[in-house]
Amino acid sequence: MTTPPSIRPLTPSDAVAYRDIRLEGLQRNPEAFSSTFERESAMPLDWFAERIVKGHVFGAFDGGELLGVAGYWPQEGAKVSHKAGLWGMYIRKAARGSGLGQRLIAAIVDHASGRVEQLQLGVASDNEAAIRLYRKTGFSEYGREMKALKDGNRYFDEILMVRFLTRD
């Protein structure tokens, strides 16, 4: 039996691997991200290292290969600091359907628990696999942002989802 991929927070020393997987995601699934390949491919390596730290990015590694990423971005300000966003989730095609997405989300939830009361995310309304994954991991829909993203002449709605981490 093979060892399952390990999940850990990325560090600035992972910036090259993170840049590679991030640019792959932006290029292969542009509809899933609010940023673009063109924008981020022009950024220096230090920019990716900074995003790792500010965005609390976690990675799934099989040996030295980074198979998936997801981040936790806390909101700033007294009235919104109880919330954070789950962002930048991407799993390489070869690792999809393996449960890796669930494990990355579990790592984010574990990290966020005790720090914030809720995790929020936006997911393209036509990304049925991601919506199923988020529902399976405890997120529920609370709204829809119409025409949230625009790529050329094409618009994408986003389903807004939340997972509460505290019991009230």
Image (cartoon, helix red, strand yellow):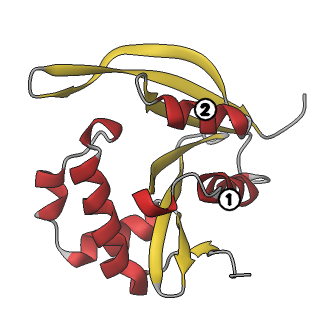
Do we see residue 79 in this rendering?
A: no
Q: Amino acid at mark 1?
A: Arg
> Which quadrant would residue 61 be assigned to in this image?
bottom right
Identify which residue is drawn at 35% across, 78% down.
Answer: 17
Q: Which percent across, then down, holds residue 10?
A: 51, 75
Question: Which of 104/14 is in front?
Answer: 104
Identify which residue is drawn at 74% across, 81% down.
Answer: 1
Q: Which percent across, then down, holds residue 5?
A: 62, 75
Numbered marks: total: 2
Above or below, 40 relative to 1: above
Instruction: Tell me the element at label 2.
Output: helix
Label 2 sits on residue: 132
Label 2: few (<14), some (14–19) or many (≥20) C-alpha neighbours in 10 Å: few
Identify which residue is drawn at 43% across, 68% down.
Answer: 52
Q: Which percent across, then down, holds residue 128?
A: 49, 28
Q: Which percent across, then down, holds residue 53?
A: 46, 70
Numbered tag placed on residue 155 in the rendering: none
Q: Amino acid at mark 2?
A: Arg
Label 1 sits on residue: 103
Task: Tell whether label 1 touches label 2 (CB within 8 Å).
Answer: no
Q: Residue furthest right?
A: 168
Label 1: few (<14), some (14–19) or many (≥20) C-alpha neighbours in 10 Å: some
Q: Earlier in the sequence, mark 2 or mark 1?
A: 1
Image check: 109 left or right of 149?
right
Image check: 78 left or right of 16?
right
Image check: 96 left or right of 107?
left
* On-image quarter of the C terminus: top right
